[in-house]
Image (cartoon, rainbow, N blue to C red):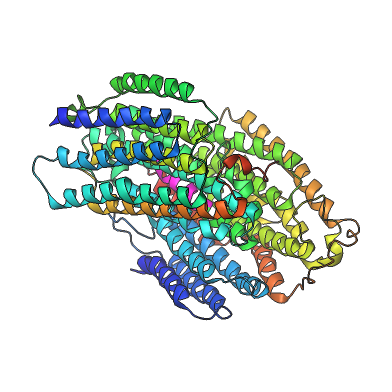
Amino acid sequence: MISLLLIFLPLAGAALAALWPDNRTRPWLLPAVGTVHTGLTFWLLLNPPVVTPGAWLAFDPLARAVLPAVSLLFFVCATYGVAYLRVRQERPNRVFVALLLAVLGLLSAGHQSRHLGLLWIATEAVTLAAVPLLHFNGTPRAFEATWKYLLVGGTGIALSLLGSFCLGYASLHGGGGGDLTFASLMAQGTCLSRPWVLIAWVLLLVGYGTKMGLAPMHTWKPDAYGEAPGIVGALLAGGVTTVAFTAILRVRAVVSAAGEGAMADRTLLVIGLFSMLVAALFLLGTRDYKRMLAYSSVEHMGILSIGAALGGAGVWAALFHVWSNGLTKGALFLSAGNIRRAAGSASMDDVRGTAVFAPRSSMIFVAGMFAVTALPPFGPFFSELRVVRAGLALPGHGWAVAMFLGCLLFAFFGLTRVVFGIVDGRPRPGAKAGGRRFVESAGVIVPPLVLMGLSLWLGLHTPAVLQEAWSAAVVQLYPQP
Amino acid sequence: MNTNLNLLIGLAMGLNLIALGSSRLPSLIRAMSFQGVVLGLMPLLMEAEFKWTVGLVALATMAGKGLIIPSLLNRAMRAANIEREINPFIGYVPSLLLGAGGTIAAVALARTLPLLPEHAGSLLVPGALASVLTGFILLIGRAKAIAQVCGYLILENGIYLFGLLLIHSTPLLVEAGVLLDLTVGVFVIGIIVDRIQRAFDSLDTRKLTILRE
């Protein structure tokens, strides 16, 4: 029952936001809904509900392992949103606020979907709801980014529908009665028609991989993250991508039950390493610090995919990484948004010396950069260490671990190059002439700071309840026969 | 029953080739909308006796794919007042050759896949694969935003054809959700097309090149 509330409460909030008359007070709906939602998900995290096996929607162990992170990220971003929308009084925010809340509701639906078709519907709906968020700034660049997002994302989501149909047909061919819940598909096991499972896996990996932003289907990401407001980037990178990742995990469990787990793991490993490589190379070349965050996100999606390929321990590490990456990336996106507003440009060529005119945001940005490049004692260091250990524990994965570490190193070079390029030095004279001065108020500084604190806390002291939740999710995905 | 269905699928495959060969936007939109109507008729042929739920899905499909979406695109085209030539990246003859080759390959590929006895003689799988491929060629090979949307819709049509294999086993709720999502998707695309037209004063996607590395 509560799991339905997690979906319908934000949707009701969205409807309320659409009707709310006042532009100035409307943004307060974001933290209001966010607080209740976070409270509910953490209550469910501590008191996991009993899941009926045939349920289409439920707060099952996998949802329990990931959804609280999304909810927490949304809550912090929502408090930032209030301050951000106050700065942007000049633009009507009715659609923006309503759709942010709708995205939260649909994400909750996607994470809790235990049915192949329902999962697709929720993911597609999130994709569409995010469209107007991307072009909130209304510039030609933003519309160009939105068009590319729609075309690439739409094609990806279409392919995942085709893949879902193929998996459905595999079940039908194997004598299934048309029950497309993941539990019943896994129960069919090796009865599923092998060729159709293989086709379905390829299509679903490409489709949901597009949504996740795995290379080479990542091309929408730099444009979308580069042009969207920081708060939208944070939610896309930490929330929307994770729903695609859990979709891939659920499908992988079915493919594994059908006896093709080794093949699925190989493809996940290759596509993950390729994403990391592509991201590292582009990180060495990009001159835009918001696009840099997008490539960093591609890199971390690669890490998730590699984790998913390394068996139970790897999936555990990947779920940990969903938390640590999502929260740290959130801090980076929010502080980058501040710097972007203060400096008036997102390119290294125009921006210099942000430590002088936006000192607090720059400090968070630099700290976040170190955290996301796996400097201890922040969360990402420990989750990536777990991935490495899971890789070393498997025979014959030494080359993959070596490549993983090499890509991390290059990504570190790329990120430091851009970050210190904009933070250091003297501000360009006249760069801020004309515009109003950007004030680093508590409303735009505290949220990213809180996210950094959470990342540090995850690294120093990973709560036992979370570790237990991740283990329970691994048991769900790798049932012992 | 099956022969009638195959006839319609063959017609849809022929419309794929017409779409690939169209050099003007209105004829491309017409080919796509006619394909939508043809697709809408199919569920009626697949049922032994008439059921009102299936009739409803068929009617919604025909109205959506054959009427609403094409009229939205036509309106966008007139409002944008764009020249009607399509300016392809991949020329019409190469597109047609690719499409024809792809159709043959789809038929050959479908033979190698295991099918249930009741689907063995039907053209559903080759038709679906050929339409998906046609959609891809249009998406990649055309420069006008509206032509790309048509490509996307033909791709969706292919997926719809494949979905007909499952029509007896998926619940209506899922079908309705899929249909709703697709409609909203095209609606959103329509809005963005309109905004791009206003921001760039053109619907030529070759002008969308600010964002690059």
Q: What is the magenta segment's predominant secondary structure?
A: helix
Q: Nearer the viewer, residue A75 or B56?
A: B56
Q: Position of residue A209 (x, y in %)?
A: 50, 41
Q: Quadrant of residue A285?
A: top right
Q: Position of residue B184 (x, y in %)?
A: 39, 55
Magenta stretch: includes residue A249: yes
Q: Quadrant of residue A213?
A: top right
Q: In the image, B3: left or right of A301? A: left
- Vertical side of B189 occupied by A356: above or below: below
Total numbered circles? 0
Q: In the image, B132: left or right of A361? A: left
- Vertical side of A70 occupied by A200: above or below: above
Residue shown at 53% from the left, 31% from the top: B88
Q: Is residue A259 visible?
A: no
The quarter in which the N terminus of chain A is drawn is: bottom left
Q: In the image, A242: left or right of A86? A: left
Q: Position of residue B11 (x, y in %)?
A: 26, 30
Q: Is residue A85 visible?
A: yes
- Vertical side of A184 occupied by A67: above or below: below
The quarter in which the C terminus of chain A is drawn is: top left
Give the residues drawn in magenta, as a range. Answer: A241-252
Q: Nearer the viewer, residue A351 or B97?
A: B97
Q: Quadrant of residue A367?
A: bottom right
